[in-house]
Amino acid sequence: MAIYAISDLHLSFGIKEKPMDIFGSHWTNYVEKIKENWNALIKSDDIVLIAGDFSWATYLEESKADFEFLEALPGTKILLKGNHDYWWTTLKKMNEFLEQNEFKSIKFIHNNAIEIENYVIAGTRYWSLEEEYDNEKIINRECERAKISLKIATQLADKPIIFMTHYPPDERIIKSVEDFNIKYWIYGHIHSNYEEHIYDVPGVKAYLTSCDYLEFKPLKISE
């Protein structure tokens, strides 16, 4: 089993297509690139972490075709909420949606944690210090959610933690989670000026996994 990561797939099979080439010509035929690279790299027993912005759908039922695309790809997929995942709802409703549609290879990180062999996965969407809308309130809430997920992770198993956020890490959340045994930090959201968003988290290997930054290839994090 190997662990891979990628984020910001921005699928839109179930709604009017959202053009992504506004971010550059490299986004042309990006879904085909994701599928081809995924099938070339990922085996059935691998884990793929998706750090947010999976689907442009507004409602869960609109995302079904996007989930069908993901389900058909090899590996177990673990999804985190992104700022554009408006379809995201309660964990109970999302798990019921998976069960009803027989999506058996997909799991969610949402105020919980998931144990996988040598690691435990935890995470929260987070926010950005640059965002203006309810900045302080949301950041405080997301830091608390991060700690909830990480505490659950430590209760599940005494194993290193892979921590996921959709937004990049900053000093606020780094300080909030510094007492936990985080080995890897996975984040996305960034679609330009990549070099300005490669962050150093003390004692942690941090990876930007926006699919365009990765040239639409899942990044291997660990064996």
Image (spheres, rainbow, N blue to C red):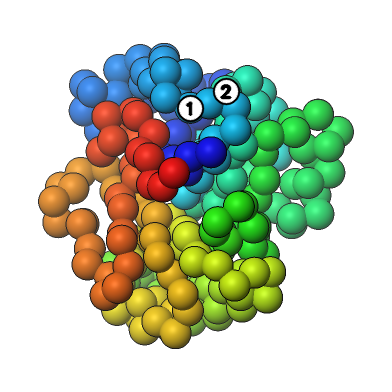
Number of residues whose C-alpha sits closer than 10 Å to that of mark 2, classed few (under 14), some (14–19) or many (20 or more): some
- Secondary structure under badge 2? loop
Q: State the residue in front, 148 or 75.
A: 75
Number of residues whose C-alpha sits closer than 10 Å to that of mark 1, classed few (under 14), some (14–19) or many (20 or more): many
Query: Which quadrant is home to the C terminus?
Result: top left
When the figure is inspected, residue 155 is found, relative to residue 64, above or below; the finding is below
Give the image location of residue 174, x and y in percent: 36, 77
- Whole-Å distance between the Cαs marked 1 and 2? 8 Å
Task: Please name the residue shown 44% across and 85% down the image.
Answer: 179
Q: State the residue in front, 18 or 115.
A: 115
The picture quadrant where one finds residue 169 is bottom left
Asked whether the beta carbons under mark 1 and mark 2 sit within 8 Å of each other, the answer is: yes
When the figure is inspected, residue 29 is found, relative to residue 156, above or below; the finding is above
* Amino acid, disc 2: Leu
Whichever of labels 1 and 2 marks the residue nearer the N terminus, that label is 1
Q: Which residue bears the numbered disc 1?
A: 42
Give the image location of residue 2, x and y in percent: 48, 40
Give the image location of residue 104, x and y in percent: 75, 33
Task: Please name the residue shown 47% across and 62% down the image.
Answer: 163
Task: Please name the residue shown 48% across and 27% down the image.
Answer: 42
Task: Say whether residue 97 is left or right of residue 169.
Answer: right
Residue 222 in view, yes or no: yes
* Amino acid, disc 1: Ile
